[in-house]
Amino acid sequence: MKVTVFGIGYVGLVQAAVLAEVGHDVICIDVDENKVENLKKGIIPIFEPGLTPLVMQNYEAGRLKFSTDAKEGVNHGIMQFIAVGTPPDEDGSADLKYVTAVARTIAEHMQGHKVVIDKSTVPVGTADRVRSVMSETLKGRNASVAFDVVSNPEFLKEGAAVSDCMRPERIVVGTDNEDVVDLLRELYEPFNRNHDRMILMDIRSAELTKYAANCMLATKISFMNEISNLAELLGADIEKVRQGIGSDSRIGYSFIYPGCGYGGSCFPKDVQALIRTSEQIGYTPRILQAVEAVNDDQKLKLPAFIKRHFGDDLKGKTFALWGLAFKPNTDDMREASSRVLMETLWQAGARVQAFDPEAMDEAQRIYGSRDDLQLMGTKEAALHNADALVICTEWKNFRVPDFDVVKNALKEPVIFDGRNLYDPERVSKRGFVYYAIGRGASVKLHN
């Protein structure tokens, strides 16, 4: 099938590459000329395991093309994906200006029937808005051309997006036209052979499904962080609690790891957007408000531990930071806990020596050159002459460090662990003061 994808961001590029990999003829359209030219040269704008070879193989095979020519994209295929960003507006609601701009563009150039597929994460009612924009644009052209609008939300995890897209757990399709279903089945047939993963529903239910999924996962994280705070105060160990409740099949082990707060492009934005949607229709989403509040507070846990140990005035202190990305296997620093940590430390007069396997360039882009931030080439280099080690991201190569090297490099043997990577008793026996999230045993050691 001929497929057009508007937006070469995280969702659009992964979806396009995977569709091309199974044989579809895909063209990606983006307004960023530099991004388009870089992609043609093999320069991928994001880090995602497995994505670079997938893009290049299909580009070289001619199944995946990149262009800034919107008219070419509209004329290319019947399937028109909208995969542009929906950044939070000033009030936290999703900003749909890019979505509606694409809808208008499609309507300006279309000559025949198109299936417009909302792949972006959008509020309930967006399909109606897309349909309205397209109808008005076609009316302005005095054109009578049929089109359908479908909600087909993505459920990709950063760090595993390619495999998630190749082997989806579910393919949610929201449509009010049964005739479109066959086209979607043909499009997704290569991913649907083992068993039928397609879940059909009305458009508004599909739009809400995406938000509900992300908000449920965010809720699990904030709930565990709430319990971790109780564990600290009660002298319990949250890791034991996690294992105890995770063994219940109704709860499971996924997304119940306590830590220094969630971040990224999805959870914070989607929780805020659903809160704003709720408020706009006169409903108070108390659980979602609490999820957001707990997460905001959780990002202050590590700074609080540091100030408990060193005092409020951190002038002259240097901290080694392991992990800048909001999670492993990505270079994404959007809403990352590391950013709250660093900015709080800087305000208190401290310096940061940071290392991350993938997010160094992103940190440079965000913060530029500054005297109180030094990006180091290795995790060991970040330790040199630092007053303490702080961990914000659970990269695999942070899990089993040489503790003798860590201890010898630091001015003081202190670790502030925002991801509970180590066993408190084992680390303390090596002579470290160890602060972790919700580990009552470690709290007793410091008090």
Image (cartoon, rainbow, N blue to C red):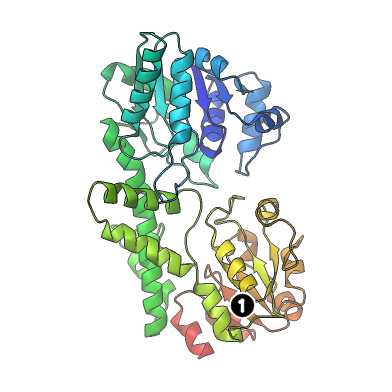
Height in image: 134 above or below 406?
above
Q: Residue furthest bottom?
A: 447
Q: Percent position (x, y) of residue 447? A: 50, 91
Would you call the spot at circle 1 few (<14 residues within 10 Å), some (14-19), or many (20 or more)?
Answer: many
Relative vertical location of residue 269 with respect to residue 378 in this rendering, above or below: above
Q: Is residue 240 visible?
A: no
User: Is residue 145 at all visible to an observer of this figure?
Assistant: yes
Residue 43 on image: x %, y %:
70, 35
Quarter of the image for residue 367 reads: bottom right
Please, what is the three-letter code of the amino acid marked with disc 1?
A: Ile
Please name whichever residue, 281 or 301, is drawn nearer the observer in this view of the structure. Answer: 281
User: Would you say 90 lies left or right of 277 here?
Assistant: right
What residue occupies the far front of the structure in this picture? 140
Q: Secondary structure at mark 1?
A: strand
The residue shown at (55%, 20%) is 70
Which residue is depicted at the point 61% across and 23% down? 68
Q: Position of residue 134 (x, y in %)?
A: 38, 21
Q: Nearer the viewer, residue 234 or 284?
A: 284
Residue drawn at the location 65% of the way across and 81% of the way down: 314
Question: Does residue 375 appear to the left or right of 359 in the view shown?
Answer: right
Rendered view: 162 above or below 370: above
The extreme left residue here reads: 282
Query: To which residue does mark 1 refer?
Result: 415
Number of on-image labels: 1
Residue 59: % across, % down: 65, 24
Task: Using the rendered view, name the quadrant where residue 202 is placed.
Answer: top left
